[in-house]
Image (tube, rainbow, N blue to C red):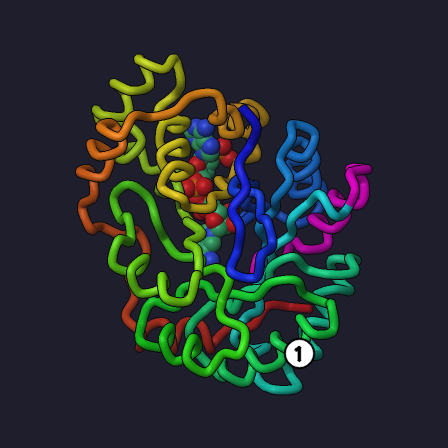
Amino acid sequence: MEQTFITLNNGTKMPQFGMGVFMIPDGEETKKACLDALKMGYRHIDTAHAYQNERSVGEAVRESGIDRKEIWVTSKLWPSEYGEGKTAAAINKMLERLRLEYIDLLLLHQQVGDYIGAWRDMEKAVEQGKVRSIGLSNFESDRLEEVCTAAKIKPAALQVECHPYYQQADLKKRIAPYGTIIEAWYPIGHGDAELINEPIFTELAKKYNKTNVQIILRWHIQEGNVIFPKSTNPQHIKDNFDIFDFELTADEMAKIRAVDKNIRFFNATLEQQEAQFTNWAPAD
Ligand SMILES: NC(=O)c1ccc[n+]([C@@H]2O[C@H](COP(=O)([O-])OP(=O)(O)OC[C@H]3O[C@@H](n4cnc5c(N)ncnc54)[C@H](OP(=O)(O)O)[C@@H]3O)[C@@H](O)[C@H]2O)c1
């Protein structure tokens, strides 16, 4: 079976599976993880200005020798870069760091600051061909509807915490009218042992001769979530991608849905997010 693609609300086809590079140090480590992944068939990398490793992601994309059109690159703007005019300049700087001609998907990383001004500039960047698709990350308050209502270009994707313990069923209903898809961060709960070792995953891993993590990742794919588990371990990078040769039954999908505990690993009120995310800015 081939890897799967999701068609976004602008008609673009995005690889549903990729590599996330949060917390991987810039330089050789990020470059190697991305190159290992690309060699194994990954065609999607998720980075952010805040991760401070966009330069190495861009290097890996160029050095892979793979046609640029085949690789999907997502990056994210930090609130310190939000505002009409300011965001346009930040997008130019991002393209310089990546040394790429365009970004496949550009997200607003956090729901604080002048996100409406930023969205206007992102829409202009789409018109200019600097960015192919635009979306949001961590917009879970009513600021989500505020942006969606103001937007000429509706968000193609919303990247949020999402895993079997926090499945985001309500959020999916909220974004359905805009044709926005969910990208799941912490797809395996940031490696949480309790989540990974839930008995249902162990049972299904035995049945399909897969690992518990592969069962979780396969569940995401069949749920329609876009995922990019992070790993610097070559065996994990290989295993995580090896999920396209089996299919969970409807009954098994339902059993995994029943694991939802409405528990998230990252908890912060909007006020805490305002304080935390406006008091820091990534270096150029
Ligand atoms: N928008 C946002 O605010 C936001 C926030 C968080 C994350 N993200 C994005 O989502 C991506 C994924 O999130 P994440 O990296 O925090 O969490 P994650 O992918 O759920 O988990 C990563 C952890 O799981 C381990 N792991 C990976 N594959 C494994 C396997 N097959 N078996 C056992 N352990 C495995 C990794 O260790 P090894 O390296 O040793 O394999 C790492 O410790 C990020 O890289 C980033 O791109 C976005």
Looking at the image, residue 89 lies above or below residue 167: below
- Residue placed at 48% from the left, 59% from the top? 157
- Three-letter amino acid code at disc 1? Lys
The image quadrant where one finds the C terminus is bottom right
Does residue 225 appear to the left or right of 198 in the view shown?
A: right
- Residue placed at 61% from the left, 44% from the top? 44
Residue 60 part of the magenta-drawn span:
yes
Q: Position of residue 180 (x, y in %)?
A: 44, 61
Does residue 92 appear to the left or right of 202 in the view shown?
A: right
Look at the numbered disc 1 and give the secondary structure of its residue. Answer: helix
Residues rendered magenta in the picture: 49-67
- Residue placed at 77% from the left, 47% from the top? 68
Q: Position of residue 182 (x, y in %)?
A: 41, 54
Looking at the image, residue 159 lies above or below residue 122: above
User: In which quarter of the view is residue 20 placed?
Assistant: top right
Q: Position of residue 84 (x, y in %)?
A: 61, 86
Q: Position of residue 30 (x, y in %)?
A: 65, 43
Magenta: main secondary structure equals helix
Q: Which residue is mark 1?
A: 124
Residue 40 part of the magenta-drawn span:
no
Number of labelled discs? 1
